[in-house]
Image (cartoon, grey):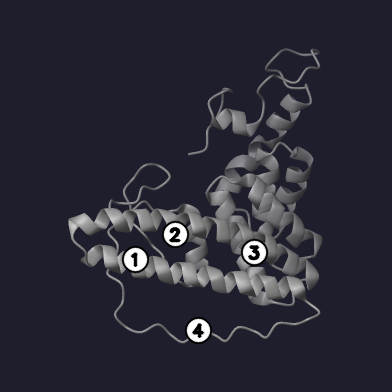
Amino acid sequence: MVQSWHICGIAILLGAVASVALAQPAQGKKGKAAPPEKAPSTSPPAPAAATPAADANRPAAAEYQRLLEEWKTVLKDMRKLKLQYQSSGFADQAEAQKGWTTLVEKGNETVAALEAAGLKAYAEAPNEDPQLTRFLVKLSDDAIQRDDYAAAKRVTDVLIAHQCPDKQILDAAAIAAFVLNDYDQADKYFKEAKDNNVLSSYGKELEPTLKEYKDLCEGTGNSRGRGQGRRPAACSYDDKQRGHCPGAIRK
């Protein structure tokens, strides 16, 4: 059973056991096999913290809590199916594989809904729930790791607009703005991330090339000659990643 990056990242965030490579070794982003998975602990899990009582004045927070519990149920079902797969015969593994695919699809749908609900809950009462804030900060970082820059921007836009105290979001915001060709915004966030000493290695790789891409997109670069005043057909960082432009590609 192939591991879902989106699900795995959020599962780690929630402190759940959801590493999943049942039928074959999971493949990393560069095609390398992940290290063998440890056997699940036989110790009973620590008691979960009680879900806060719903506040009638904060409907978004109540919806977020509901979806969070739904997500935790998906994770429990995944772990249960994983154990079932490991102890079943070959004939039953095919059926478990189908069940796993269904759970992954459901999990990804739940995570998408959880993101939207979490952003609404955060905007409803900014920075009042530290666990929610940490969840959203981690969500933006996970989005960068799986190259979903639009998702990272959705999250960081809301966090920054409401003065999130965790400055780590500036790194994700800068990278997302850069790859999405919003170079003025990227310049602003790169500077703030550097000032707060939160710029990641990926951010440090991109930041020095900002002027090059900004000049290309404003028609002031030298790649098509001076004075032409036209943006090259493919000048974005995303194009360069796909091999459409000369220059460095993300390692």
Q: Position of residue 34 (x, y in %)?
A: 33, 53
Instruction: Give the mark nearest the N terminus, 4 or 2.
Output: 4
Q: Are marks 2 and 1 in contact (CB under 8 Å)?
A: yes
Instruction: Please name which of the two marks, 1 or 4, marks the residue nearer to the observer.
Output: 1
For label 1, the crowd category at 10 Å Cα-Cα, with few meaning under 14, some 14 to 19 and many 20 or more, is some
Q: Are marks 4 and 2 in contact (CB under 8 Å)?
A: no
Residue at image coords 47%, 67%: 74
Residue at image coords 65%, 35%: 209
The residue type indicated by label 2 comes to Leu
Mark 1–mark 3 Cα distance, whole angstroms, equals 28 Å
Instruction: Give the mark nearest the N terminus, 3 or 4.
Output: 4
The residue type indicated by label 4 comes to Ala
Q: Which residue is mark 4?
A: 48
Q: Nearer the viewer, residue 17 or 251?
A: 17
* Left or right relative to 104: residue 85: left
Q: Which residue is mark 1?
A: 81
Q: Circle 2 sits in a helix, a strand or a loop, which is it? A: helix
Q: Which residue is mark 2?
A: 103
